Image (spheres, rainbow, N blue to C red):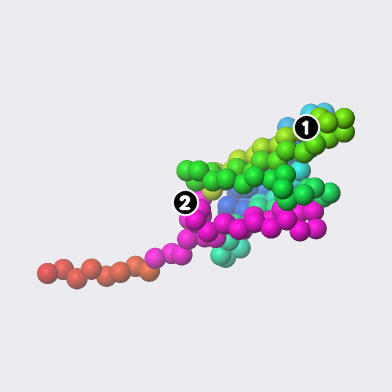
Amino acid sequence: MKKVNLENLENLFELFNEMDNLFKGNNFKTGFSPSIKIKQSADDFIISVVAPGQSKDIFDISTKEGIVTIKAEVKEKNDFFDSFSKSYRLPSNADLNNISAEYKDGILKILISKKKEEASKKVKIK
């Protein structure tokens, strides 16, 4: 496992992904298990789920109490179903009322806007 610098949130997400990859390595991996990458820009948190050959209809994205959950169910050969679920606690500046998602070219991209910082306001004392 590679060392991860914890100086910012993007690196913290990278650490979580590295830990996930450790436990779902070749000895443990079975069935449908898409790769997930999380990063942030100045305005958004971006979650990318790499799932080529799938349909957007297999995915379900939900939020509750600061946690985003990504679920998927795929039909395998011989009518067997395989499912996937992953949840991430988002930072307090994530705007859970402003989320969009798009599935294109085998990648589900989820954009979660950051809340705008309020400007400080001077209070006049009477």
Q: How many numbered discs sit on the rendered protein?
A: 2
Query: What's the magenta region?
Result: 91-118
Which residue is at 27% across, 70% downward?
122
Residue 105's disc number: none
Position of the N terminus, as image quadrant, is: top right
Nearer the observer, 80 or 41: 80
Q: Quadrant of residue 8?
A: bottom right
- Give how far apart the Cα atoms at labels 2 and 1 are: 35 Å
Asked if 85 appears above or below 45 in the picture, the reply is above
Instruction: Give the secondary structure at mark 2.
Output: loop
Q: Quadrant of the C terminus?
A: bottom left
Of labels 2 and 1, earlier in sequence is 1
Q: Position of residue 83 (x, y in %)?
A: 72, 35
Q: Main secondary structure of the magenta part?
A: strand
At mark 1, the secondary structure is strand
**Residue 29 in sight:** no
Residue type at the position of mark 2: Ser
Residue 113: x %, y % from top left: 55, 60
Give the side of residue 119 with respect to residue 13, left or right. Answer: left
Question: Badge 2, how many Cα within 10 Å: few under 14, some, many 20+?
Answer: few
Say what amino acid the circle numbered 1 marks: Phe
Is residue 103 something one can see in this rendering?
yes
Please report the residue visible at 77 percent of the width from the left and 49 percent of the height from the top: 55
Does the magenta run of residues contain 116?
Answer: yes
21 and 100: which one is in front?
100
- Image position, residue 19 (x, y; %): 69, 38
Instruction: State which quadrant residue 62 falls in.
Output: top right
Q: Position of residue 79 (x, y in %)?
A: 83, 31
Which residue, given by chain and number where applicable, does mark 2 sit on?
A: 92
Identify which residue is drawn at 38% across, 69% down: 119
- Return the residue at label 1: 81
Tell me the residue at 84%/49% (across/down).
53
